[in-house]
Image (tube, helix red, strand yellow):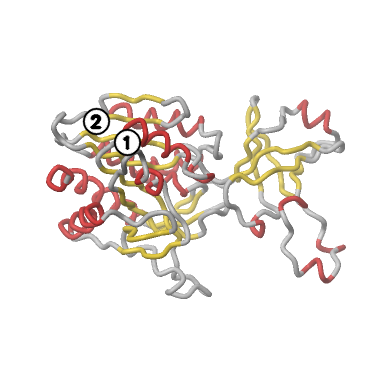
Amino acid sequence: MSFVNLLERLSNACGVTGREEEVRELMKELLKPNVDEVREDKLGNIVGVRRGRKDMPSIMMAAHMDEVGLMVKNITDVGFVQFAKIGGIDDRILVAQKVLIHTEGGPLTGIIGSKPPHILKEEEKKKVIEADELFIDLGASSDKEAREMGVRIGDPISFDIRFTKLREDVVVGKAFDDRVGCAVLAEVMEKLEKVDCTVYAVGTIQEEVGMRGATTAAFGLYPDVGIAVDVTFAGGVPGVKDVEAPIKMRKGPSLVVADRGLIAHPKVLRLLVDAAEELGIPYQLEMGSAGTTDAAKIALTREGIPSGVISIPTRYIHSSVSMLSLYDAENAIKLAITAIKKVPKIF
């Protein structure tokens, strides 16, 4: 399977935070042929293990399976679905979105509705409509009909966006944060030749609400090195200054120096930089991002785990659709493989 097809399958899957089942099963399928063992832990993380020599260090590479989304909160008497946001979603992007409510009987299509603009007062037109004022219209006429369609409180809701290739290297789709990391992880394990160190390829859950899966997975595995494979928001678009978002699409993977939750361990940062320079691939150094990744929790596990981040520059993350360059993702794969091979020389 080509990388773009792999990313398409992962992007189109539903894995709203806390409801990662579909992505989890897909990750099991993708990892199984290329590891010695695949297991699911108690919380729902997926761990693929490639065993190395016992006297060699171990490395945990983590990509989170969950995506920001919505969840059914209430069904009104006249059949409209009210929802809660799961993860950091900007209310501005919600109005008129086509969504899927994932019920036990299958997905239901709905539209996020609001008060018609024709009857808004002037002061209302200037305000962002908050999520609590929005609703999902399934075409039902009562709460009874909506429930007969299969809707239940707690059902996950994803954006109904299908993966599309725009240009040779540019793709758009849902949940690239962090399905591209999952795709990179799967591809790394497929292309990785035999190495001396033990490699844990981990698909984590609930990253978008506090990196919960990475916290428990890292505690259980307690590797010698941790690397999160995630996305970072890409600048280079109108209205965004370089000082606000210096990382650009098509300029290579980003290596975190420091973000809101992590100061990359100098040995890990050096490992990643040396790997990129050895390969002669472009890379970017990222400093001061307002976001953070699973690496922040991995680093603080037990007595501490030296950790770092490989990020794929991605536009419009935490919205219904994102954009990235396949070149950046493919270079992230090469970088990760070379870094894994170099771990025994540094740790």
Q: Residue at x 86, y 67 (%)?
A: 121
337 to 233, vertically: above or below: above
Q: Which mark is residue 201?
A: 1
| SS class, disc 1 | strand
Q: Is residue 3 left or right of residue 127?
A: left
Q: Residue at x 78, y 53 (%)?
A: 114
Q: Position of residue 313 (x, y in %)?
A: 40, 59
Assign the N terminus to one quadrant of the image.
Answer: top left
Which corner quadrant of the image does residue 282 belong to?
bottom left
Assign the C terminus to one quadrant of the image.
Answer: top left
| SS class, disc 2 | strand
Check whether the beta carbons of the residues at disc 2 and disc 1 lie within 8 A of each other. yes
Q: Is residue 74 left or right of residue 68?
A: right
Nearest to the observer: residue 206 or residue 328: 206
Give the amino acid at mark 2.
Arg
**Gap in Å between the C-alphas at discs 2 and 1?**
8 Å
Q: Is residue 114 left or right of residue 188?
A: right
Q: Position of residue 6 (x, y in %)?
A: 39, 40
Mark 1, residues whose alpha carbon is within 10 Å: few (<14), some, or many (≥20)?
many
Q: Position of residue 208 (x, y in %)?
A: 51, 46
Residue located beneath label 2 in the image = 50
Nearest to the observer: residue 120 or residue 164: 120
Q: Position of residue 197 (x, y in %)?
A: 18, 36
Q: Residue at x 36, y 47 (%)?
A: 229
Q: Residue at x 15, y 57 (%)?
A: 278
Which corner quadrant of the image does residue 243 belong to?
bottom left
Give the amino acid at mark 1.
Ala
